[in-house]
Image (tube, helix red, strand yellow):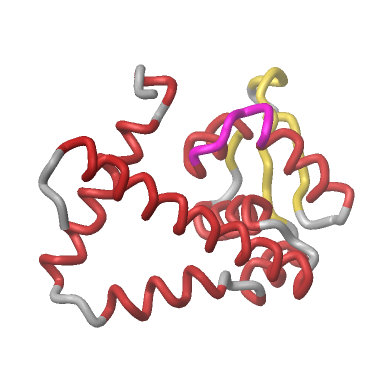
């Protein structure tokens, strides 16, 4: 492995591209098997685990734009997997909740890639698991366009 910063940056970006490719393949498999995209599954699982929340809260929780989450929720609602209800105390806010069918779909459709990651991480010493997360979060922060990264 090179310690030259330019070469190291290229190697890191190549590794990230490999991860993105794997995520894309995993998402296509999930669509074929369960009729859900990875972002749809992520939203369903988050709602199932965390309970009802606004679409803005969900967008933050799954690290997607509010507009993207709105489109996802539109499609999930049409399929009867989530419901939207105005908050009684503040009609401007809409709560999104997973339905029984949505909860079943969330439970039945784990991502193969997520399973592989979980199995591989379980084999690492606990301290190394935290280090993997720290480094990936650092790279995500570097890549995040909203924080000034390129």
Coordinates of residue 87 in the picture (x, y in percent): 68, 30
Front residue of this view, candidates 143 and 61: 143
Quadrant of the rendering where the C terminus is positioned: top left
State the image quarter where residue 147 is shown: top left
Q: Nearer the viewer, residue 66 or 22?
A: 22
Magenta stretch: residue 95 in it? no
- Describe residue 125's horizontal placement relative to residue 25 as left or right: left
For the point 30% across and 50% down, the residue is 11
Q: Is residue 65 magenta?
A: yes
The image shows a total of numbered marks equal to 0
Q: Nearer the viewer, residue 139 or 123?
A: 139
x and y, in percent, of residue 18 in the image: 46, 58
| Residue 37 placement (x, y as % from top left) | 70, 57
Give, as a single range, the part of the protein colored magenta.
63-68
Question: In the shown orientation, is residue 131 left or right of residue 120?
Answer: left
Displayed quadrant of residue 94: top right
Q: Residue at x 27, y 79 (%)?
A: 122
Q: Nearer the viewer, residue 105 or 145?
A: 145
Image point 13% across, 41% down: which residue? 4
């Amino acid at each position: 492995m090179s310690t030259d910063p330019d070469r190291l940056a290229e190697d890191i970006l190549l590794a990230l591209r490999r991860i993105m490719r794997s995520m894309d393949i995993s998402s296509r498999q999930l669509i074929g098997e369960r009729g859900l995209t990875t972002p749809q599954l992520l939203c369903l699982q988050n709602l199932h685990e965390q309970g009802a929340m606004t679409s803005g809260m969900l967008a933050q929780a799954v690290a997607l734009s509010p507009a993207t989450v709105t489109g996802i929720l539109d499609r999930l609602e049409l399929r009867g997997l989530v419901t939207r209800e105005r908050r009684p105390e503040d009609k401007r806010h809409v709560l999104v909740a997973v339905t029984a069918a949505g909860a079943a779909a969330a439970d039945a459709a784990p991502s193969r890639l997520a399973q592989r990651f979980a199995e591989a991480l379980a084999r690492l010493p606990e301290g190394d698991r935290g280090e993997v997360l720290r480094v990936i979060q650092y790279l995500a922060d570097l890549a995040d366009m909203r924080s000034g990264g390129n």
